[in-house]
Image (tube, rainbow, N blue to C red):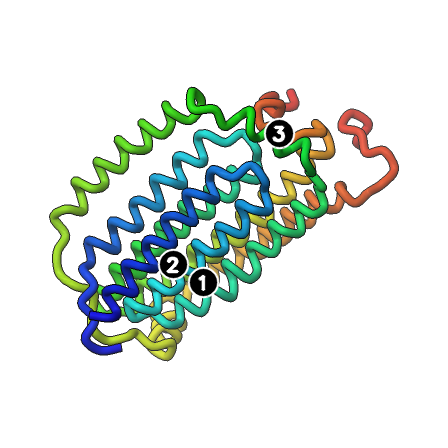
């Protein structure tokens, strides 16, 4: 792995492009499964930025924050997909516009 | 030089796969593209000297989290009807505005990162160093992560348990 010279700002460019794509997906989709997928893309792009910064300084901290982001993503997806099952059961659709009322 | 070429190839694959994933109408197709995107990001991790992060990306992201999505999509059994509905929601007049806003924010990010310079480090950060730091100065973060996972476990169990109850769960007759 010696002699690599990948510029840091190119990696950050890829990361921010992924974030922008994920945010666009989050805004244009109404299906809750696609919304969760877009959130995954955004979290993943943030993780890429952290790992790139860690690699820039040659420190393990970036990878540790990556693991914490992985934990957050796993917990978020588990709860989110549980909510997907509930939404499908109650509203018979995955359109989030139908789930716009709270209980009270 | 080869590594730099590999980086650009992997970055292109990641971006194209993500765009395709965000614009599919079939959830399973989108998921497969998303897995390709995650694998490409894992290649980038490996190239910038984070082999442990690359392995975790494949094992946990592409392996575990995406399988969770597959299970839920299979349980919901959306079919062709869902495809048509998605196609109606993906008209240009719907996505033009959000795409513009996302592009503006991306331009701002681009301006911010344009001042960053310098290459990433030439040496890989091994799993041993990551482990030593994780259970040294970051041990509190490990505890917080474990509590977060416990909360996620309890929450998903609570939400999924009622889905599995067959006989007439009603919102109003809840005791």
Q: Foreground mark, 2 or 3?
A: 3
Q: Which residue is nearer to you in this view: B139 or A73?
A: A73
In 3D space, how far apart are the residues under numbered discs 3 and 1 (Cα atoms)? Answer: 33 Å
Q: Is residue B28 left or right of residue B11?
A: right
Tell which subunit mark 3 falls on: B
Q: Mark 3 vs mark 1: tell me if same chain.
A: yes
Asked whether the beta carbons under mark 1 and mark 2 sit within 8 Å of each other, the answer is: yes
Which residue bears the numbered disc 1? B57
Asked whether the beta carbons under mark 2 and mark 3 sit within 8 Å of each other, the answer is: no
Which residue bears the numbered disc 2? B41
Q: Decide which of tag 3 and tag 1 comes sooner along the chain.
A: 1
Which residue bears the numbered disc 3? B84
Q: How many numbered marks have been drawn onto this rendered protein structure?
A: 3
| Mark 1 neighbour density, 10 Å: few (under 14) some (14–19) many (20 or more) | many
- Residue A1, horizontal then vertical, whole percent: 27, 77
Q: Is residue B97 above or below residue A14?
A: above
Residue at 20%, 70% in the rendered image: B1
């Amino acid at each position: 792995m010696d002699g690599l010279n990948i510029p840091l700002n190119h990696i950050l460019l890829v990361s921010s492009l992924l974030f922008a794509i994920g945010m666009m997906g989050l805004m244009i989709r109404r299906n809750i499964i696609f919304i969760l997928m877009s959130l995954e893309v955004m979290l993943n792009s943030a993780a890429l930025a952290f790992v790139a910064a860690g690699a820039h300084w040659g420190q393990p901290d970036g990878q540790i924050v990556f693991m914490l982001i992985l934990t957050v993503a796993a917990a978020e997806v588990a709860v989110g997909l549980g909510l997907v099952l509930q939404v499908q059961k109650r509203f018979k659709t995955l359109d989030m516009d139908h789930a716009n009322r709270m209980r009270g | 030089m080869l590594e730099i070429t590999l980086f650009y190839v992997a970055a292109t694959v990641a971006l194209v796969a993500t765009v395709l994933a965000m614009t599919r109408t079939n959830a399973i197709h989108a998921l497969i593209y998303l897995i390709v995107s995650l694998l490409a990001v894992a290649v980038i991790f490996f190239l910038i000297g984070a082999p442990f992060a690359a392995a975790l990306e494949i094992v946990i992201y592409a392996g575990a989290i995406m399988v969770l999505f597959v299970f839920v999509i299979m349980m919901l059994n959306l079919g062709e009807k869902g495809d048509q509905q998605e196609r109606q929601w993906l008209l240009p007049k719907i996505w033009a505005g959000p795409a513009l806003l996302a592009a503006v924010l991306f331009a701002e990010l681009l301006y911010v990162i344009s001042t960053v310079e310098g290459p990433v480090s030439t040496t890989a950060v091994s799993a041993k160093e990551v482990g030593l730091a994780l259970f040294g100065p970051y041990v509190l973060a490990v505890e917080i992560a474990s509590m977060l996972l416990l909360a996620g476990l309890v929450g998903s169990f609570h939400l999924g348990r009622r889905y599995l109850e067959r006989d007439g769960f009603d919102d109003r007759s809840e005791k």
